[in-house]
Image (cartoon, coloured by chain):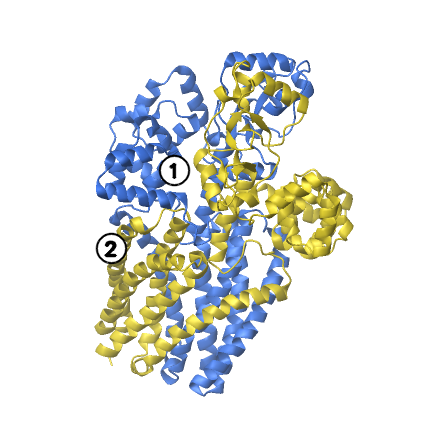
Chain colours: A blue, B yellow
Amino acid sequence: MAEPAETRTRTAAHLEALTQALETGTLRRVARMLNALPPAEIARLLESLPPPQRAVVWELVDESYDGDVLAELNDEVRATLLEDMEAEEVVAALEGLDPDDLADILQDLPDTVIRQVLASMDQENRRRLEAVLSYPEDTAGGLMNTDTVTVRADVTLDVVLRYLRMRGEIPELTDSLFVVDRNGRYLGVLPLTALLTRDPILTVAEVMEREPEGIPATTPATEVAQLFQHRDLVSAAVVDERGRLLGRITVDDVVDVIREEADQALLSMAGLDEEDDMFAPVPVSYRRRALWLGVNLATAFLASWVVGLFQDTIDQVVALAVLMPIVASMGGIAGSQTLTLAIRGIALGQVSSANAAWLLTKELLVGLLNGMTWAVVVGLIAWFWFDNTQIAAVIAAAIIINLICAAFAGLTIPLALRRMGIDPALAGSMALTTVTDVVGFFAFLGLASLYLA
Amino acid sequence: MAEPAETRTRTAAHLEALTQALETGTLRRVARMLNALPPAEIARLLESLPPPQRAVVWELVDESYDGDVLAELNDEVRATLLEDMEAEEVVAALEGLDPDDLADILQDLPDTVIRQVLASMDQENRRRLEAVLSYPEDTAGGLMNTDTVTVRADVTLDVVLRYLRMRGEIPELTDSLFVVDRNGRYLGVLPLTALLTRDPILTVAEVMEREPEGIPATTPATEVAQLFQHRDLVSAAVVDERGRLLGRITVDDVVDVIREEADQALLSMAGLDEEDDMFAPVPVSYRRRALWLGVNLATAFLASWVVGLFQDTIDQVVALAVLMPIVASMGGIAGSQTLTLAIRGIALGQVSSANAAWLLTKELLVGLLNGMTWAVVVGLIAWFWFDNTQIAAVIAAAIIINLICAAFAGLTIPLALRRMGIDPALAGSMALTTVTDVVGFFAFLGLASLYLA
């Protein structure tokens, strides 16, 4: 997401044009501009508008785009728009959507509307939707569509070519046809490029590729994303436990998974959620943020309690109060570097028990070296500032202790959280700060109480 | 990147199997396992190994994979592997790589090796490489490959079909052919699916799609990524300033851009870099981290200096030293929530001057409400703890002030940094903490000095 500052993203440019047009009230121009954009970009713009403007712009979106735009919106923004729509409007908007998108949206709707949507579908489409709905949203089954084009292994390419021409239409993002046997079991893929270049008298069996294997429907979305990245796939088959073809996943949905997961790691480190509306009403945001602040307050009081243990010492040497934030701050920063590396490494599968020992040794050594470096610097500054060598020695020792503990906590906390089934990105940062604050204050004030008071 | 804790990614599973095999010394098994994986996954595994094991495993990678694996590795890990290779090995490994990957790798090589690589290429490939090398790595030109298949608009589909069959091969990830005029100007795309389903007597001009437009070679990679996401593209044409076809970008490279950008945002908030080797030698990591800690130390001393201004007050009321970390901590957490939202919104183009005023009002209100909530809580606790209503009142007021300032700083700092051409993710977090520490200590101790001392 980082980018050179001088570039202006398309979305930002469109957002500014849109806002200007809204302000001058030239709604017809807004509508024209808007409906020339792809649905995904309309969705990004709607997410970027405050609710009053959002409602206006949503009205201007061409009705035939409504479904695709809804599918691209984040959960919370979508829910607010759906709330204000009549049931008939919703049913009309959702018509013709892919089953995976439809399955996502249905979960936000009241039961009465769901029934109306289901009633409006033909049997074939209802059956497809139910197939997708039977898997959790974040699995291969939840990501799949059922618009596969299948062929048998024993026919010739010439037959396939004539079949496609008769069919007259191939779904978007189809780079290969799926080869199945008579029981619907997935056997492999027939790339369109092979179909176009190989001799038409060859049979599908002679030309097809047996790789990649079908993806079991229960495979987590994260793993599907890794598979697509590692093998540069455009589409892949989803199979049931008996190897029968259920549907296919296309790269556009995988790209969304990758972006959302990466965003989620960034946001959850601050206790936020990728599906939240940036422009949610103040009371909603207030309650969400309050929760996170409340958890932090508990940990902050823990650190404060540690300081409280040494009130007498501080009373005698007030310079300790002045210097103590530095010990905590340096530990927090050093620890968060190790923590961030660990969180990313764990999510990508690059940090695990296999290399944890090696990494820990390295991080502890880096912590020790940095601890010694900054202990000297801070010690010297403290010495000149307060003209007291004992304070200088105590803060130097405390910084070394805290940076080593920070390295240890920065790596072991996320690994432990993961083992406990807690998202390291969500809880790691606050747990780490608690450790570095408590250790920092305890080491600094504790040593001071021994040698200074 | 966040994922349910109970799932184990493929990479993590492979990493553990690999480490076990290495420990038991069954190198032949390691080699067999390794060379069955796609190059991108081999690269992830090499990145996840400590240097001694990495060197062993790299030797086991089949030589014919070397180039593709190098292309997938992060910059620093690649550089360490290249260092230990003979020039001839490097030349052999790089043979047959796509120009975009080759261009990336060449930048890490010494001039003598670059000359050898260029000398080993035929004129056609050298010309292609030079085309890619003439654009920065993070632009459409730097991402492109030159393996386009082009057709003219005035021929029939039947002629195109015969041409492809004669050609015998179509590059990977080709979903459409590019239509160009006699001067090489890009006119549009002919999807393979259209080629397979439309009547062969139609001309290309009758069937081709004029969307999407060609991407100018100087377009930033970030914008290319947005375009692919918004339009669900598999490949897109890259054109020069006169609209002539230069090459094409494929979705696999775009997926890498998206993942790397998102990772970079997460890592740069902790002063880290996506291209760094997690297992870099201790001295290298030490120096890198030291820089970040040094910057933090300067800001920590600023906060410490503010506390120093009020030494006399603390000397009289030592409870202030106990409570002051709480004011700073609450401000830091509240501010980092606003900051994270802003950093992500700016990167996606969803936060700009068009909606900044609305967002600021919202964030200030949320800050005010949370400030009041936690002011009451902290005030009550402080009152019971120290049995002093004045301290309670002062800390309550300081928390409200700091949370409002935190909301203001959390949004304006990243916007200002961006305007100054500085990456908000890199500098935002430290700048924010400086503000919330300084304001927190100043408000709390300043009020205390007025009403308590």
Residue occupied by mark 1 = A41
| Element marked by disc 2 | helix
Above or below residue B255? Residue B152 is above
Relative to A72, A285 lies left or right: left
The alpha-carbon separation of the residues under discs 1 and 2 comes to: 29 Å
Which disc number belongs to residue B365? 2
Dots 1, 2 in contact, CB < 8 A: no
Give the amino acid type for the residue marked by disc 2 in the picture: Leu
* Residue B340: image location, x then y, percent: 39, 54
Quarter of the picture containing the C terminus of chain B is bottom left
Relative to B337, B180 lies left or right: right
Give the amino acid type for the residue marked by disc 1 in the picture: Glu
The answer to whether any part of residue A411 appears in the image is: yes
Q: Nearer the viewer, mark 1 or mark 2?
A: 1
Q: Residue at x 51, y 54 (%)?
A: A414
Above or below residue A189? Residue A349 is below
* Residue B442: image location, x then y, percent: 30, 73
| Tag 2 subunit | B
